[in-house]
Image (cartoon, grey):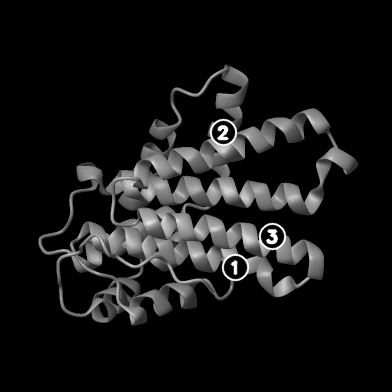
Amino acid sequence: MEEVAAVRRAALAAVDDVEPDRLHERIDARLDDASLAPGVLTLVSAGATSDPPVDLADGVADRAAGVQLIYEGLSLTRQLARDDPWVNGDRDTADLDILIADILVSRGFYLLARTEAADAAVTVVRSFGHDQTVRQTTDDESLDTALETDILELAVVAGVTAAGIRPTPTLREYATELAVDGLPSNADLLAEEVADTLRARAGAEQPTGDGTEAAADH
């Protein structure tokens, strides 16, 4: 699985300079244990819609790492909000984890900042903040998987725009369908039928511009 390895390498490289060692080690451990589905879908989307195929070393892996890091940071934030370790657990570890979450999201933003997916990344984070506020006040469990839906849509946007294609509504819809049961496995995303569907829903290739739409609010 070349895509899985490429995502992991790029994500680890993006946080390689984090200090002190204790902080860096916890970040590495989290990335080692993470589902890499968001990053993998970014690469699959780019590969399925580009002709000739995109080069993983030509900035596309960095886009995938950006999506992955944003997901990891927000996912950790969601976990902390649910568990509230400041009340029920180890406060020192919780303080470290919230710092890690901030680092992961900020590094992810940095990798996507100069891409057509930048606005979509901002929308994902804003939606996440709104969802978490509503979740805590209403106990609406339907919001528990909203992050996965939004992050896979961001992955598709980041991937296809790397190939010079404006993401279509049907393409975005397919991304949300992939997250209906949470994050799919890497193997599922690497199946040929996923690439075929992405290619079909991408429609005619057209150059992207400054007005690339942000990921839609759910």
Residue 85 position by quadrant: top right
Residue that numbered label 3 is attached to: 132
Element type at mark 2 = helix
* Residue picked out by circle 1: 146
Residue sitting at 46 percent across and 49 percent down? 68
- Residue 37 in view of the camera: no
Q: Nearer the viewer, mark 3 or mark 1?
A: 3
Residue beneath the point at 77% across and 54% down: 82
Q: Which percent across, then down, holds residue 178?
A: 47, 73
Q: Amino acid at mark 2?
A: Ile
Q: Which mark lies nearer to you, 2 or 1?
A: 1
**Residue that numbered label 2 is attached to:** 27
Q: CA distance from mark 2 to mark 1?
A: 24 Å
Estimate the x, y position of residue 57 in percent, counting from the top left: 22, 42
Alpha carbon separation for disc pair 2 and 3:
23 Å
**Residue type at the position of mark 1:** Ala
N-term-proximal mark, 3 vs 1: 3
- Which label is found at residue 164? none
Which quarter of the picture shows residue 132? Answer: bottom right
**Which mark is in front, 2 or 3?**
3
* Residue 158 seen from this side: yes
Left or right side of 217 for 204: left
